[in-house]
Image (cartoon, rainbow, N blue to C red):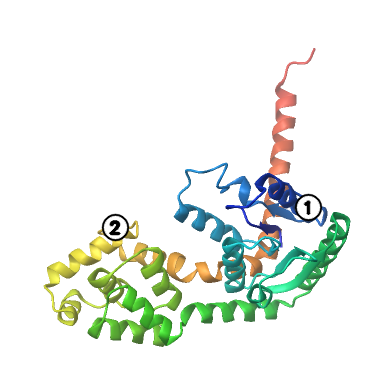
Amino acid sequence: MDEVYISGALTAIADGARARVFYELLAEIVSECGLRPYLPHHTTDPIAAPDLDPRSVYEIDRARVARSGLIVAYAGTPSFGVGIEVEIAREHGIPVIVVAERDRVVSRILLGSPAVVEVVRFTDLGALRRALGEAIARITKTTAGRAPDEVVQRFLGSLGAARQLPEAEVAALLRVAELDGDAARMIRGAVADGKLFGAGLRDLVGRHALRGAELAAFILHDVLERAYADIARTLGADPRLIRRRVEQARIKLQLAADADVAVIGQWLVTELIAPPTRALQLRLFANSGRVENDEQRAAQTEDHRQAGLAVEEGEPRA
């Protein structure tokens, strides 16, 4: 657990400068616990970065939440953004500490989130420093002591959750995508059978905005590996038109229209399967990665030492 995401209201708050100073204090407490804080207002602040478009803000903040090991969420000021970030944390199995003044009312749905493992109430900054430090210590101790098998099970559970979606949500996504008939039936079956990750369907419809025949053609051809002629019969269209639909969909996904099957396969894994489970993957392999990094740093240090000796030996002596 290296990075801690500091979540708090930034938009349309009464005293933005004071709020940012408070978030800096939370980051200081995190640092004192030996962890690295991440402050969103250093990157996506609506005042400091007003030209950053909403989708970019969402993608940046979502990615930083997903790669964090812990979220410290200030809930003393109501915020849609904080609620979304806590829900992203729940989706990725990341623990959340909610922080608020003792006399502030906090939404029950936020406090009821399964991601929230600690609630720190405070009356003064000294009490906040003590209580938050103790909460972070408890969570890091629990995480450090977690058996590898448990982490593996959480990873597999996250993978399963990414694969499946409730039938009602799949139906709603297909309505948004303006897709029905045989193509919709085949896609529902693919999600139910695990051939298409439910989270992947959500991303194709929501994040990438594929619709209608483009969505159907891409899934049937590039995910389910159906031939153009078969897809044409399913959609009642000419095979050449189906090919164009697939190519158009690939371009929208920032792939080449004539992308190789291996490239498509890699994209499917990294974009439609990996994101919902990336945080647990990083946590699962954190120790081995740390060992590799330590070994690399040691090798680099030795290389630099040897290079320094070589320079010294080659220098003219006074």
Q: Is residue 138 visible?
A: yes
Q: Is residue 87 above or below residue 298?
A: below
For label 1, the residue is: 31
Question: Residue at (46%, 82%) from the top-left corner?
Answer: 165
Where in the figure is residue 117, as x and y percent of width and height?
Answer: 73, 74
Q: Is residue 217 visible?
A: no
As drawn, 155 above or below 290 = below
| Disc 1 crowd, CA 10 A, few/some/many (<14, 14-19, 20+) | some
Look at 18% across and 64% down and name the residue there: 244
Kind of residue sitting beneath label 2: Ile
**Residue 156 screen position, x and y as percent:** 58, 80
Residue 75 in the image: state x and y as whole percent.
Answer: 69, 64
**Which label number is shown at residue 239?**
none
**How far from the left and from the top, in percent, is residue 223?**
33, 74
Q: Looking at this view, is 6 or 141 the one in front?
A: 6
Give the Cα distance between marks 2 and 1. Answer: 43 Å
Q: Are marks 2 and 1 in contact (CB under 8 Å)?
A: no
Q: Residue furthest top?
A: 318
Q: Nearer the viewer, residue 158 or 41?
A: 41
Quarter occupied by the N terminus: bottom right
Left or right of 276 on screen, residue 265: left
Disc 1 marks a residue whose amino acid type is Ser
Please indicate whether residue 278 sits to the left or right of residue 144 in the image.
Answer: left
Residue furthest toward the left? 238
Name which quarter of the figure residue 283 lies in. Answer: bottom right
Q: Which residue is mark 2?
A: 251
Q: Is residue 114 positioned above or below 256 on the image?
A: below
- The relative height of residue 182 versus residue 202 in the rendered view (above or below) is below
Lower position in the chain sequence, tag 2 or tag 1: 1
Near mark 2 (Cα within 10 A), the count class, few <14, some 14-19 or many ≥20, is: some
Mark 2, mark 1: which one is toward the viewer? 1
For the C terminus, the quadrant is top right
